[in-house]
Every structure is written in C-alpha cells, then in structure tokens.
Image (cartoon, grey):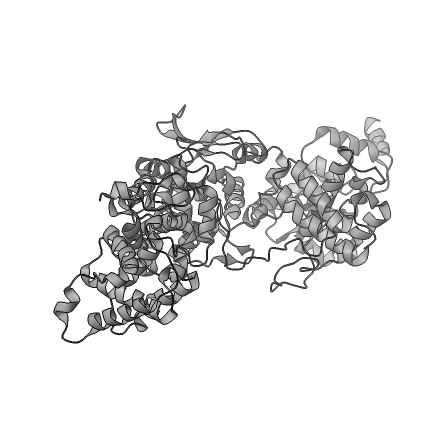
Amino acid sequence: MTDTARASVPTGHVWWSPTLSRAHYDRRSALDDVERRAIVDLIARLQGKGATAARRRPLDNGDLSRLLRPIADAFDVMGSDATDRRAATCILLSECLRRGRSYWAWTPQDWVTVLGGTSLEFRSHQRPRVSQSVRLDLAGLAYLHGCFRTVLALGHFKRAALAARVFGHDVVMAATARVASRLRQWGYASRTALESCVCEALLLNESPCLGHLTSHGLDRFRHGGRACKRSLYFQVAKALAAERIVEAPLPVAPSRAGVLPASGPRGVPPVWLEWVARWQHTSTLVTRAHLRLHLYKVGRWLAAHHPEVESPADWTRALATDYVAAISRMRIGDYVIRRVTARGGMPLSARTRAAELGALRTFFCDCHEWEWIPRRFDPVRSLAVPRSIKALIGPAPRVIADDVWARLLWAGLHLMDTDLPRAGAHGAAGQAYPLEYVRALAMVWLFAGLRSDEITRLRVGCIRWQQADHASDTVCLLDIPTTKTGTAFTKPVDPQVGHAVEGWERIRPAQPQATDRKTGEAVDFLFMYRARPMRQELLNASVIPILCRKARVPGRDVRGTITSHRARATIASQLFNSREPMSLFELQAWLGHHSPASTQHYVAITPTKLAKAYTDAGYFARNVRAIEVLIDQDTLKQAVAEGEPWRYYDLGHGLCAYEFFDQCAHRMACPRCDFYRPQESTLTQLVRAKGNILRFLHELPLTDEERAVVDGDLAAVDRLTARLREQPTPAGPTPAQLVGVEEK
C-alpha cells in the first residue's frame, strides 16, 4: 500500500485510515472463556524459554482471530518490525486478559495506563524490557483504530516517528518540508523541534493534510497541556498563513511567567466597567488601551470611597475635586491588582499624577463631546493638574554622560560576532540575529536620534546618498516614516549609519510585507527578520546590554537605566552644545518635532558651555569698572599738613584728585571742577613720571547710565551730563555754573 493512498482523507470531520474499516472488525468488549484460555496459551508460547521457533511462527490462532486481525492490519499499515509486533501483541493481549475486556472497550485512561505517562514509566512496567518503538507501535495502533488519540497525555515521545507510522513517512516529510522551506527563506534554521511541532499539530488535528489546519486550532494546540514550544506554533502559523493555508498568523502569546490573573478589572464596578469598554471601542486614540488601566483605577477608587457612584453620568464637580485631592495623596500600588513592587507605598511621581488626571479628563471630555452624558461640570477645569504638581514637571532630559556615551559609540563601531549572545544553551543553537542586523540597529540607535517606534518602522531603502554642494564628500540621508507628531521627513546622519544599514540590506533574507500600524500601508520593514518586525523592547532588552557589556559600562547611571530614548536626548544635547552648535530651530527640524517647546525637553546645556557663556557675557565686568589709582608717596607725608592731593584716579582723559571719587555723581562726566587734572596738563605728566608712585586698581559699581557711557554711547554721555547739570560738584559749583564761568 502506498503512503499517498494511506493518507487520503475521506469527507468528514475525523480522519480514518482508508484501509482499516472499523465495520469489518468484531468490536465486542467481553472476552469468553475460549478467548481467555487462548490468550494464556499464546502468551506462554511467546514468552516461554527455549521456544524461539515457536515464537517465530505466525500468530494464526483461530480462537483469537477477532483480536489478532485488527492488530496485524494496523502493524501492516505502520510497517512494524516482526520482533516489535510480537512484543506489542503480547502486551496488548496481557492487558486484555487482566482487565477482562477487549481493547475495543478500553477508556482513554486505560490506554494511558498501558502506554505510560512517560517512556520511562512504560518501560518500567514491562518484563522483560522492550524498546521504545514498541510503545510507538501500540500508540499508532490505538490511533489508527480510533481507540485513543489524545497523544499529549503520553508526555515526551517522538512526534515525527508516530506521525510517520500513522499517516505515512512520505506524507509527513512533504508537510514538514513545505513549512520548513518557507521559514528557511525568512531566516529560520531547520530544526528537529520544528518538525516535531508540525507532526504534533497533524496528530492533534487528526489529519495528515496541512489544509485541514486552522488558526483557531493551532492557537488551541499551542496552549495545550504538554504541547511543543509556543514559539514553534507561532512559526508554523506564519508559514501556513504565507502559504494561504490558514486565515492569519497567530498573535504573540504572552509569557506564562508573571501573567496576571484573568480577572484584570477585578474590583471595578460593573457599570463603570461597561462605560470604560464602550469608550475604548469608540475612541481612536492610540493609547486608549493604556488609558483604560487608569480608568480601572478610578473605578476601584469609586468602589472604595463612593460606592453610590457607578456611572460617569453621576459625577459632579465636587466629586471631581475630591478625586484630584485623592490623586495628590495617592501612593504606588493603590487601587491596582498586581504584585507589589519594591517601590510599593511610595508617593506617585508628579508625571504619574498628571497622567492619572489626564486619562480621566480625556474620558469625560469624550463622553460630553459624544453626548453620552449631560454636562454637569467642566472636566478641563475641574480635573486640571494642580499648580503644585505642575510645578514639579518640566524639561529634564536624562542625558548620558559624555565619557559613557563615547565608550558606547566605540562599542557600536567595533561590534563583533563574539559579542552577540547565543540563542541556545552554551551557544549550541547559534545567534538569534545576524551580526549585520545587530550592527545596523546599534548604529541607528547611536547616531540617528530616533524614537524606538521610528526605528522599528524604518523601511528598506531608507538610506540615500547625496553630493554636498561645496564639498567632495557625500551626505548620508535617512528617510524617517510618519512620526509621533508629524509627517515623514528626511534628516542627515553620519555615513557610518548608511554603511551599516546597507551591509544589513545586502544579506537580509526576503521577507513578507507587513502593515505599518500608523499608516496602514503594506511595507518592507528594514529591521524584519523571520517574518516578524522588530520588537521595540529588543533595544532595551538585548542591543543596549550588548553594547554596555562590550564598552564595560554599567547599564544604569545616576539618571536611571540606559534606555533607547535616552540616546535621543544625549545626541540632541551634544549637537546643541558643540563648538559650532545647531540652533534650536535646526535641532527641532532634525529631531522631527512639531514645536520648539518639544525640543527643549531633549536639550540640556552642559555646565562647561554655560560657564563659558557666563564668562563671555562679562556680568561682573559689565557692572563693575576697574579704574587705576595712583598714590604719590612723596606727597603723602606732608599731604595731611599742607592739604595737597596725594591720591589720583586715572580717568583716561585726565586725573581726579577727589579722595571720595567712588561716591562722586559726576565721575563719568567730569566737568572742569577743581579736582580735575586734564590729560594735557603738566601736573598730570609729572605725576605719571614720578618713580615713587604706588599703583593699584579700584573697582567701582556702575549704574545703568554709567555702564552705557563706558560702552561708548555718546547719547548716554549727553543724557548723563544733562541730568547732572544742576548737581554740585565736589568743589561746590554746579556744572551749569562752571560752564557759565568759562563762557565769560
């Protein structure tokens, strides 16, 4: 009989072997006395010592023909070995004798007891010991006759060997090869585990045809008791979806470790839960699933403090005010259903409090806008973030230190194959991603300043080279898809990014197109491998730790864990603080921000640049002027007695002998008073020429008008002179009187 004929599937839900018709067999459950004695004799003959020739004779006992014929037919279909046939027949008839009924009447639990929950358990019950193939022959016999098909109850066994016995070796190999060839095109390696998964799916589906598999069935199989790895079912479903055999690939299954209980919204009033579900189904916000969690928290707060309020229509301004006050005092872990973290009990951060109020404010604004509830209060005003909380929120870019960032750049430029972790134990299974993939991803993260979502959605061919206008070098341009706040745009990046991306594109396996979740287009994603777009957590969970290990820097600093978004702030701050910095508006265009206010959240002025700017501004020098003071030590001895001037203030255009010059109102517009010595006077030259002159600098605080005069503002000189026209000089007369004397 050919494998193709044996694998044909008749019309119906359950598969049956076309050569084993159950209607042709005597399926009575009870054993008569003749059959019992025949079983005893046959077992004695098969297990008797020195009866090798007897054991080799055909099993043609006429009294057991109704039991032996189905067994022989099944073994013929499977092509079992003669030795294994006799051992399996002996085990099967012994169990029939012990249970007092034929194998047609056994329950699934009886079959599990005979076959064993594990291979070790099966062998330990057999005396003498038998090979593992005997267990597979018994399981195949039960499967072919429809007595037992719950194969997962058998624990770990060779799925491919059992499927080949039941469906035929050629059919099973053709099915597994079809799936493996498609996955191999996408970058998956051919593994025995994948073949086992395909065979397990065929056995559980009770059909050798891939066309009889469905997405729902595969999803049910991967969540079975002792099924193969769920990731393998995910791969098989992707291949079958590409072959148009199943409707769609399977969604990514959540990890079983740390899974929250199914009753996630536990503690939320049913009415409030219905309103939240209705809002989520109507809203078009991308973050609506996350905002829903905040609304669940509001529902639990209502149940604890205001059980009489269940619907948003019952909310008043007073209740909204009460909730704002509760948010100000709320702590981490309050009104949530999850494990308490190490930070449980600590006050909520200002940003978290603002997010809690923002979620509820959005919910009520939508309910009012859609006319679901009457307007009883203004959510924008009643649920606004308090000023005390808003004052704690501001631009705080978590910039990575320059020395750490430099070492990370070095690690990305010198990434090697040995730096990548292995997918299996001791590196037996190889790398999860090719080196070119990881290097291109690292270079984009280190140089492009993109959000993780934008990196994930980069497309094949995003690198373009353009000749510069006044340079021999070419400029590397990177096409950015639609961003969080704007449309697609193009930005210049370092050529290292272009070389790394082109290196990955050269070896990138052909991948199916995927849907861009923002634009809805079917595109070729750059970072797509094994028919799966890059997971956003890949940067934080794998690539960044790899770079930190190679650079020998910790993955956490004083500002927190080094994450993908911190690179964006670091690059922006370095571009803003460079020797020839980018302006705020240029940086806004490079980052793709809609408003300069957003750019300010990413820019941090370094203390070095701030100190230089402060020094260049000359704050102290602008408000204090150093004036040279000349002290005539020869005259100082007799100055007190004779009243001669002994200290002179150098004004540049002359000297002033007034001892309290720093208190003189006319010091910046000196008239011809008695204390003034003009530059061209003989006395001035004589004082400067004296060798016994003590010189020092005297700092004077300046007013705004005086500072303008120092800066050379002629109009300021005129204004200062006019204001001091009637103010007496240290000698007594006013400037107006002095001018009048000169005119006469």
What residue sits 61% from the left and 54% below the top? 692
Where residue 643 sits: x, y (%)?
78, 52
What residue sits 81% from the left and 44% below the top? 382
What residue sits 38% from the left and 53% below the top? 146
Residue 361 visible within the image: yes
Where residue 184 sits: x, y (%)?
31, 42
Name the quarter where the C terminus is drawn. top right
Where residue 743 sits: x, y (%)?
82, 26
Q: State the image quarter where residue 280 is shown.
A: top right
- Left/right of residue 154 with respect to residue 562 in the rendered view: left
In the image, 686 versus 415, the foreground residue is: 415
579, above or below 261, in the image: above
- Left/right of residue 463 with respect to residue 124 in the rendered view: right
Name the quarter where the N terminus is drawn. top left
Where residue 236 sits: x, y (%)?
38, 44
Residue 679 visible within the image: no
In the image, 191 versus 702, the foreground residue is: 191
In the image, 519 versus 145, the foreground residue is: 145
Q: Quick one: which residue is furthest to the left in this view?
A: 53
Question: What is the tally of numbered marks visible in this picture?
Answer: 0
Q: Quick one: which residue is furthest to the top in this view?
A: 469
In the image, 81 versus 469, the foreground residue is: 81
Q: State the image quarter where residue 505 is shown.
A: top left
687, above or below 462, in the image: below
Q: Quick one: which residue is furthest to the bottom in this view?
A: 49
